[in-house]
Amino acid sequence: MKNFFISALVFLAGYATGSGAALAQSTAPGAPTQSNLVGDDACRSCHAEQFETYHHTAHYLTSRVADASSILGSFAPGQNIFRTSDPALHFEMDEKPLNTKPGGNQKAFFQTSVLETSKGKTTQTESFDLVVGGGTKGQTYFYWKDNKLFQLPVSYWRTIGWINSPGYPDGFAIFNRSVNARCLECHATYFQPLPEQNTYRRDNYVLGIGCEKCHGPGRDHVQREQSKRAAGSPSAILNPAHFSRERQLDLCAWCHAGLGIRSILPPFSYTPG
């Protein structure tokens, strides 16, 4: 009961579900693409102070590549086990070296379900690929299966440790909770959805809520600033502080108003302002 209750409170509840199957998965005309997104590093030379400060916020850290620094849960022996309501089922969190070269210290991280019955042992192992959640209260984890994204069945809560992921029933060894585009739209700057449900271009996404999520695609802005644009000419970047109240509310409500009843436009087609 405790695990179920905590799972219901995890910030992603209701997002990484199959309920978004009706959401359009195509990229709308004018939506951000890899060609007009430049990434936060392009902002650093002119906005160093803002860059350094912002990159420690929960917004920026809300999705990251899974590694030793981004995964909060412990992989130490005895602390890497999550036991379920079924005494025959538990989950193990393990880290393994990526290479065997001398001095190599890169690691990969895995989540394994272990079901032991009178008929023998059954296991399933998937990798920690993406961390989702700033970690203030907790975080959950996604794994890639070809071009599809799924949520791992065990998440992490700071005050408890390993817990059931939201949407997964306690006591079952399943890994099939699909990640729809609406979930990613609030936890990443950009993903390029493909026509099939929970399928994305693995070479065209930007993790975290980066500068361009709220300021708009920055390629034109960078090019104009590098070419020393004339004084008074448009900067080709958006400043939410100058938006009308309604447009400011639109921008925050994009992620902070809940899942919504229906999709008006395809995911990642909204432009701030």
Image (spheres, rainbow, N blue to C red):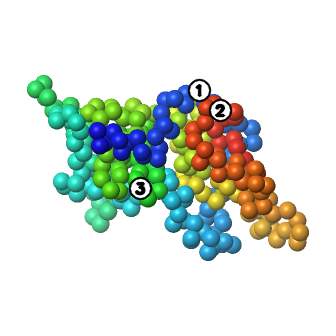
Amino acid type of the residue tagged 3 in the rendering: Lys
**Could you tell me if the residues under marks 1 and 2 are in contact, i.e. CB atoms within 8 Å?**
yes
Q: Which numbered marker is on residue 263?
A: 2
For label 3, the crowd category at 10 Å Cα-Cα, with few meaning under 14, some 14 to 19 and many 20 or more, is few
Q: Residue at x 20, y 33 (%)?
A: 86
Mark 1 / mark 2, whichever is N-terminal: 1
The image position of residue 200, as x and y in percent, is 55, 38
Image check: 62 left or right of 90? Answer: right
The image position of residue 234, as x and y in percent, is 85, 62
Q: Residue at x 82, y 71 (%)?
A: 228
Q: Secondary structure at mark 1?
A: loop
Image check: 154 left or right of 188? Answer: left
- Residue bearing mark 3: 137
- Is 250 or 139 nearer to us in this picture? 250
The image shows residue 247, relative to residue 150, as above or below, that is below
Q: How many marks?
A: 3
Q: Secondary structure at mark 3?
A: loop
Amino acid type of the residue tagged 2 in the rendering: Ser
Q: Residue at x 40, y 53 (%)?
A: 138
